[in-house]
Amino acid sequence: MFPLSPDAVLSRLAPLARTPLATLPTPLLPAPALAASLRGDIDISIKADAWTGLGLGGNKVRKLEYELDPARLRGATDLVTAGGPHSNHCRVTAAAAARLGLGCTLAVNGEPGDAGRGNALLHRLLGARIVTVADRAAREAAMTEEASRIAGMGGKALVVAVGASTPRGALGYVRAAAEMREQVSAGDCPAPRRNPPAIRGAPDDSGARSEAPVWIFTSSSSGGTLAGLMLGCALMGWRAQLVGVSPDDPAAKIRAAATEIALGAAALLPHPPRGPDPRANDLIERVRNVAAATLVTDAFVGPGYGAPTRTAEEAIALFGARAGVILDPVYTGKAAAALIAWVREGVVPSGAHVILLHTGGHPALFR
């Protein structure tokens, strides 16, 4: 059963219905000038999931493809979800509702400083109904209440979990992991400027020749994106070093959430065509091993969620000036700050191919 090729991973996912919303595959963009400005012995690429298309893109689009599969949408008249007043997830859910001809209600904790800027503006431009609640703890009850209100009017609401960070939603990032693996193997990134050292330890499970070690940095909050990468790496036996960078919660909480979601996503995978595999439990062990090896840091949160930091501001400026890539101050700027610091400090080894998974969010620049 294991390891699987990227194509085999996509074949395993094929029976799981999804509603196509994203523009895929997103490119893996080389950033040689950025790499040279940091260290001369690594390569850097950006996986441009800010370019997934729907509603200004971002990682939520891949997740919503699976959350909004046709069976779950059958008979639905509205989507209901929740987030902060500048939530990327709310923006993309509202865009999906508009694309699918559905109503949309957003339970938003707090008022934006200016409803005419950033994602707060986009929520309204995309036709969403905004219900303001006092705090995060009140969001779940508000979503339930809105679903009941819609039912009372003869409609049917599909409630979408905050961040679409569910086992089903994480399948979008199993696909993304396979996509990245294929792009790295196919050379959709610059050839190393040196002879990189082999990955330390045993060879890749696939038996392929040694490659430059791959480090993937991603922002991780509710854990769904990181969970999908964990499961994808487990399926493929890809020993990429995953790094989850928190914009808010403690590292231990994020690791635990991502691991739980990844295990739940593994349980959704259909059996191979020949029936149950006697080694099915091997996948659970593989996911646990990948999760244990994943590095999660909360060292770049700064004063708190959404609060600017000097290192994130430097990262945004550096990625703009040296790679032509726009980051945001809430999520990707802090993930990039971790990448820069770990490259400069030598945590990332010589010869590595470093990938920033750009999860989107640039409307936050215009709040």
Image (cartoon, grey):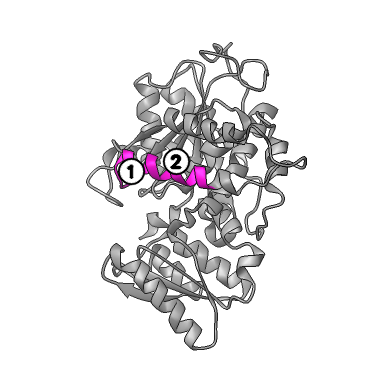
Left or right of 38 in this view: 1 = right
Label 1: state its secondary structure.
helix
Q: Position of residue 271 (x, y in %)?
A: 69, 43
Q: Residue at x 41, y 37 (%)?
A: 244
Q: Residue furthest bottom?
A: 153
Work out whether residue 330 or residue 223 is closer to the camera in this orientation and state it.
223
Left or right of 358 in this view: 253 = left
Name the image quarter holding residue 273: top right
At label 2, the amino acid type is: Thr
Crowding at dot 1, Cα within 10 Å, few <14 / some 14-19 / many 20+, comes out as some
Q: Which residues are magenta?
A: 247-264
Work out whether residue 118 or residue 60 is closer to the camera in this orientation and state it.
60
Q: Residue at x 68, y 19 (%)?
A: 208
Q: Quadrant of the N terminus?
A: top right
Main secondary structure along the magenta-highlighted residues: helix
Q: Is residue 105 visible?
A: yes
* Residue under pointer 2: 259
Q: Tell me the number on the disc at residue 133.
A: none
Work out whether residue 35 or residue 77 is closer to the camera in this orientation and state it.
77
At label 1, the amino acid type is: Lys
Q: Is 254 colored magenta in this rendering?
A: yes
* Residue under pointer 1: 253
